[in-house]
Image: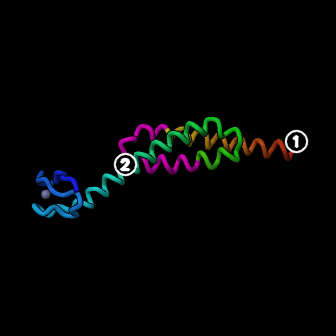
């Protein structure tokens, strides 16, 4: 058992307490907000990584579609986090390379129906 400081009144209280005994501040909901925040930060980071992967993945539509679409979803979730810039980078990269993937698969389909393959 460790002591933490209540974010509301500053009193030292047990970290196992759900509610501050001094002021009644709900510590669990505060903890949950922090968890959500770090989760969103991770989404932003994953979005950027997927965005970077899609720079290569668009060449093969089979990889390009899941990579860019999942990247857009993760980046969008991470937009309100502290990794906002990473999320924006991921979002922009994923959208650009989703368009590349689309063009690539359309051109690929057009070529294959014309019998070049
Ligand atoms: Zn308190």
- Which residue position is annotated with label 2? 38
Q: Is residue 101 left or right of residue 36?
A: right
Which residue ends up furthest to the front in the rendered image? Answer: 1
Q: Is residue 115 magenta?
A: no
Query: What residue is shown at x 45% (from left), y 48% (from top)?
Result: 43
Q: Is residue 72 left or right of residue 29?
A: right
Q: Is residue 83 magenta?
A: yes
Mark positioned earlier in the residue sequence (2 or 1): 2
Vertical position of residue 89 compared to residue 71: above or below: above
Q: Which mark is residue 117?
A: 1
Q: Quadrant of residue 68?
A: top right
Query: What residue is shown at x 23% (from left), y 60% (from top)?
Result: 16
Residue 27 in the image: state x and y as whole percent.
Answer: 22, 59
Q: Which mark is residue 85?
A: none
- For this rendering, which residue is in front, 19 or 79? 19
State if disc 1 and disc 2 touch (CB < 8 Å). Answer: no
Q: Secondary structure at mark 1?
A: loop
| Residue range (magenta) | 69-89
Query: What residue is shown at x 82% (from left), y 41% (from top)?
Result: 111
Residue 58 in the image: state x and y as whole percent.
Answer: 66, 40
The mark closer to the camera, 2 or 1, is: 2
Q: Residues within 10 Å of mark 2 (few under 14, many from 20)?
A: some
Query: What residue is shown at x 88% (from left), y 40% (from top)?
Result: 116
Q: Is residue 82 left or right of residue 11?
A: right
């Amino acid at each position: 058992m460790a002591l933490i400081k209540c974010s509301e009144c500053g009193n030292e209280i047990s970290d196992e307490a759900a509610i501050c005994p001094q002021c009644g501040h709900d510590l669990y909901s505060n903890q949950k907000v922090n968890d959500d925040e770090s989760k969103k930060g991770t989404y932003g980071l994953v979005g950027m990584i997927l965005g970077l992967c899609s720079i290569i993945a668009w060449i093969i539509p089979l990889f390009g579609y899941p990579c860019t679409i999942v990247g857009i979803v993760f980046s969008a979730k991470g937009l309100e986090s502290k990794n906002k810039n990473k999320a924006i980078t991921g979002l922009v990269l994923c959208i650009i390379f989703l368009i590349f993937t689309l063009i690539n698969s359309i051109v690929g389909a057009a070529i294959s129906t014309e019998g070049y393959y």
